[in-house]
Image (cartoon, rainbow, N blue to C red):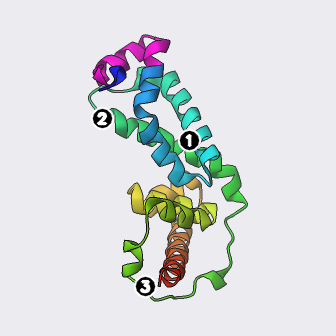
Amino acid sequence: MRAHNSIAEIELIQQCKDGSLKYQELLYKRFYGYAMGIGLRYSTNRDDAQEVVNDAFIKVFNTINTYNTDRPFKAWLRRIVINTSIDRRRKDLKFQLHTDIDDAVHIGHNTTAVELLNAEDILKMMNMLPAIQRTIFNMYEIDGYNHDEIADILSIPASSSRVYLSRAKEKLRKALTTESQNHE
């Protein structure tokens, strides 16, 4: 076990609250992979995800004194990474709210295609989605937000959130169908 993993999470957090740069680095190293996993889902590429993660950790260290140690740290960090990702993309999303309705054609679903995919394939498919659709898909399907919450966060109508989610699912089905045909 690495030395930084042997330090109790509560001690790490307390030392960060006390302003210790050493412990901030240890906290960053311990939770970097977790934060990066979230950042990758919301970003178009690894560099963008890296910037989101770094910005999120800056927010963590600037606001760690507000963290309530009675609640799980990972949940608090997750919320910060998601919000940082959304804040970063918010400007871009304003210009990407319009997509062609032609893309929302019904395509049959091949259940065996999923078995052939690895995480990298899934991330590539997610990155093919327009930013607004990818963000809403992540928020709704993976992070458990409802359409009203998504609407409030992204400043869009809840009905638009539903439409974008539907379009994202259709595009992913189409990509799955194409991918399964490529593996046949």
Q: Quadrant of residue 119?
A: bottom left
Q: Secondary structure at mark 1?
A: helix
Q: Are marks 2 and 1 in contact (CB under 8 Å)?
A: no
Residue at the right extreme of this rendering = 95
Give the class, few, some or many, for how many residues have Cα within 10 Å of label 3's Cα (few <14, many ≥20): few
Q: Position of residue 24 (x, y in %)?
A: 46, 19
Residue 6 in view: yes
The reply, left or right, for residue 8 in relation to residue 131 is: left
Q: Considering only order in the chain, which callout, 1 or 2, is on the residue closer to the N terminus?
A: 2
Where does label 3 land, which residue? 109
Q: Secondary structure at mark 2?
A: loop
Q: Amino acid at mark 2?
A: Pro
- Residue sitting at x 40%, y 58%: 142
Residue 145 in view: no
Q: Position of residue 64 (x, y in %)?
A: 44, 23
Closest to the observer: 182 or 35?
Answer: 182
Q: Amino acid at mark 1?
A: Thr
The reply, left or right, for residue 10 in relation to residue 78 is: left
Quarter the N terminus occupies? top left
Q: CA distance from mark 2 to mark 3?
A: 38 Å
Residue at the front extreme of this rendering = 184
- Residue sitting at x 63%, y 45%: 48
Give the class, few, some or many, for how many residues have Cα within 10 Å of label 2's Cα (few <14, many ≥20): few
In the rendered structure, find residue 72 and report the number of the disc placed on it: 2
Residue segment shown in magenta: 5-24
Q: Secondary structure at mark 3?
A: loop
Q: Position of residue 29 (x, y in %)?
A: 45, 28
Q: Amino acid at mark 3?
A: His
